Image (cartoon, rainbow, N blue to C red):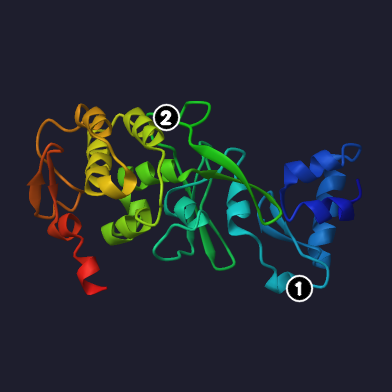
Amino acid sequence: MSSEDFFATHPVFTHEEFSQSRRRRSPRTVDSLLRKHCSSGRIVRVRRGLYVTVPPGSSADAVEADAYLVATKAAVDATVSHHAALQFHGRTYSMWSRLTFFTRHPTRAFQFGATEFVPIRPPKAVADLPDIGGGVDLVMSGGGLVRVTTCERAMVDVLHSPTLGGSWEEIWRSLEMVEFFDLNAVISYALALRSAMTVARVGFFLEQHRDALFVEDAHLETLVEHAPKQARYFDSSREPGRLTQPWNLIVPEPVLRRTWEELA
């Protein structure tokens, strides 16, 4: 395969992928070819080992690439996650230029264009599982396959690590844009994280939206069994609120009453 044939089918690619397409070339020759194509403006180096192809007739200075595809190529197991996953699925209240992705490999954050790419270690309870806890899809986007968590997993992940989902208003409004959740998948993953706080937050959200999401008593009962046994603040800010049962959560009034809806 010629370099041009490779570029035609690889809008975003890694050094390893390009090297595999040049099997009869030495590593030194592969590096030389990549430097040559970077110098000519045919490709752009995003960071070490990661490149974007410049479409014919386009300028290397103005090249754009599918940010989710760039994130997927950032590590061999990179998976678009949290708010970025909901954004990929078109289910966020606001658009962010900060894109998070799960990876078990040491990876530094980087910037490309207007987007900041931030690696996140998978939750400890599932980090070493082959599928990092499941709920991961491969979806075509930008001329390649994007690895991204499902809405079900993204829901639990933002409730598990709310700082990666934005404010509670952003999280609530984003999750409310999802018309349907596989509740069994939501509950299974929530329990897999082995966090009573996460289970309680998921349970509280589902109970608050039980009619819209067709939540049954059995769903909530399964979660209640693993909720905190003593009262816990809804998040680390320890904002005052009202104790909600059976979740043992002290929920701030804005979340409890969804006061942002009053301002809409």
Contact between marks 1 and 2 (CB within 8 A): the answer is no
Quadrant where the image shows the N terminus: top right
Q: Neighbour class for label 2 at 10 Å: few (<14), some, many (≥20)?
A: some
The tag earlier along the polypeptide, 1 or 2, is: 1
Query: Relative to 256, is 263 above or below?
Result: below
Of the two numbered discs 1 and 2 in the rendering, the one whose residue sits closer to the viewer: 2
> Under tag 2, what secondary structure?
loop
Image position, residue 201 (x, y; %): 24, 43
Position of residue 83 in the picture relative to residue 250 (left or right): right
The residue depicted at 22 percent of the width and 73 percent of the height is 263
The residue depicted at 84 percent of the width and 44 percent of the height is 28
Which residue corresponds to mark 1? 59
> As shown in the figure, which amino acid type bears the numbered disc 2?
Val
Of residues 3 and 134, which is closer to you in this image? 134
Image position, residue 55 (x, y; %): 79, 65
Image position, residue 228 (x, y; %): 16, 33
> Under tag 1, what secondary structure?
loop
Which mark, residue 126? Answer: 2
Which mark, residue 219? Answer: none
Of residues 135 and 23, which is closer to you in this image? 135
Image position, residue 2 (x, y; %): 91, 50
The residue depicted at 52 percent of the width and 49 percent of the height is 108
The residue depicted at 70 percent of the width and 58 percent of the height is 45
The quadrant in which residue 244 appears is top left
